Image (cartoon, rainbow, N blue to C red):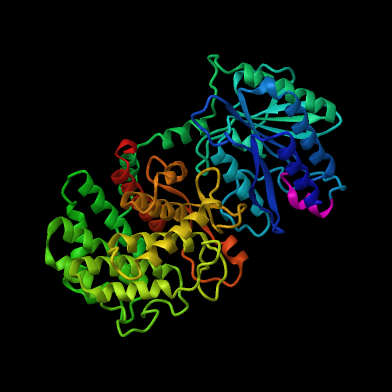
Amino acid sequence: MSKSLESALHNLVRERLDTSNITYCGITKNGYQIPVLLHKSAYDFNGDCSRILIIGGISGTDSDVQLSLDAIETITIHYNNFNALSISYIPCLDYDAYISNPQAPQAEGTLTHGFPPNGNYFFDPEIPESRYIWRWVSYQAPDLVIELSLAESTRIESNEAAPAFIADTDTVRSVSDDSLIGALGRKHESNPGPIPGVRITGTNTQVLSKTVELLHKAADSRGTDQPSSSHAAAAIRKRRDRTAQEVSEALASQFGYKLDSPINYIQGVGVSGRIRLAEHKNQVVPDDIFQLVDPYVDNPSTSFGDAPGSASLAGAVWADDLFRVTEDPRYKNYLLDLTDRFESDGSNPPAPADPKWRTEDMFMLGSMMGRSYTLTQEAQYLDILTNFLVEMDTQQISGLFWHDRETPFYWGRGNGFAVLGLAETLTYLPQSHPLYADTLLMYQKLLNGLLQYQNPSGCYHQVITLPSSYQELTSTCMIGYGIARGIKLGLLDQSYLPTLKSLWNGTKARITEAGDVVDGCTGTGALETEQDYIVREALSGYDDRTGSLALWFAVEMMQLMPSWA
């Protein structure tokens, strides 16, 4: 049955709707991808069109899904009357019910209530799709959501955020319950703002007629004194309109104030980001940074235990920044002390790098060895680094990287580590080096492979190749940083600017005004199955790792694009 719906959508795109593409808004409990017919302007928050999202198939029955398809056909016929609207569709919300038994009516489906879902993003054992749908709709932030369903009599219900032209509709009733439509009408900590919503219930003919009538009103409301965008859309637009400096300062107000023992890159990058921000603004480094790092610098053995991991060693990236701005040799010596703890006897990978060649070490080694070479001009650092990279043997024909040699999955942050590590390496690697061309090719091949997997929002996914997995912020920031650095160094041409701008907009949308972040994958080792990556917890609010990497990206954008800063 899933093929019949997707086939119908593909036929619509091919024959009638060249302004739309098929994507996905989440994964069901049984592992099915929930399809979306997405208008190409669905994420254009500054466009002239009102962005409408029509949702059907709440019960998952064949008849409810057919109602969605009939609505798409009917609206397409009237398309010229709706050229002020950008209309997208989720034709079957309860996709598991549709797949399992589409002929059986359900009195009350699993997605008729329970919004906004509380926690368990995106791994709830019973209703994971509610988490996906809530976040996807909230951050696509349409100006109006219309829910369609079948019943014997006509009923129109609107939520608390509904605009005046809906409130004036005959027989409309208010709804503020925990249904999707009801919850979208209220501000919540898990969404950027309220979204107007209407539920139209009735026979097939009645629903289609009322839907067309409502769309006419939405189109006619353009240019009036009524708000043309939802509060959520206005909030996203405000976030996206921020300069790189404003985003950097928001993030720097939260991250870069911790450096726990054993030190780790997830906090060290944040410290580095604050130093770079102060340097870019021609300000002195804040005193609290010196108070934070100097106990480690004065006694390096306190940085970690007897067996430091590569993530701990890379936690000292800030030492290079401090040496650059202060010229105090203590910071240079501290960085070299930690770098020299990687084995240099020719073993590969150099311990304590993971013996399975994990992509994390592309960043850990790339950041430390490159900086140490620049400080000393000693070729051994580049030899350790480049020999490691060219012997990785986990980059596939597509350009993407497996997580490690025994883990053939395209984890989002795993590929983010690869981009970040290669960009850091190429920052310090001289073009005269014998392995420069191989390293550059690896980097360019990876970025070319990633281009086809970017979500229309600008973000990348928890599993790069699975468009229904959640939009993950750390990988988005790492890839964005790597592209920005490549353009700055002349490694990438200007054709990458639209991709970078989309990445930047997607990143800004998921960073609040206070500097909180949305959906960064929690700490993750090599996992046994792709499903293990799919259900890996997404953290929102305060998260050192995501916030630190977002700060690096934001400061990089300040340096690359003064006009965006």
- State which region is magenta: 92-101
| Residue 522 visible in the current orientation | no
Depth order, front residue of 325/30: 325
Above or below, 14 against 322 in this view is: above
Residue at (47%, 42%) from the top-left corner?
Answer: 502
From where the camera sits, is residue 229 visible?
A: yes
SS assignment for the magenta stretch, majority = helix
Reply yes or no: does residue 95 show up in magenta. Answer: yes
Residue 414 percent coordinates (x, y)? 48, 64
* Vertical placement of residue 255 versus 143, above or below: below
Q: Within the magenta stretch, is there residue 307? A: no
Q: Which of 11 and 234 is in front in this view?
A: 11
Q: Which residue is drawn at 22% across and 58% down?
A: 321
Name the residue located 74 percent from the left edge and 49 percent from the top edge: 95
The percent position of residue 15, horizontal first and vertical second, equals: 74, 36
Q: Where is residue 130 in the image (x, y as percent from the top left)?
A: 64, 48
**In x, y percent, where is residue 473?**
47, 52
Tell whether 68 sits left or right of 547. right
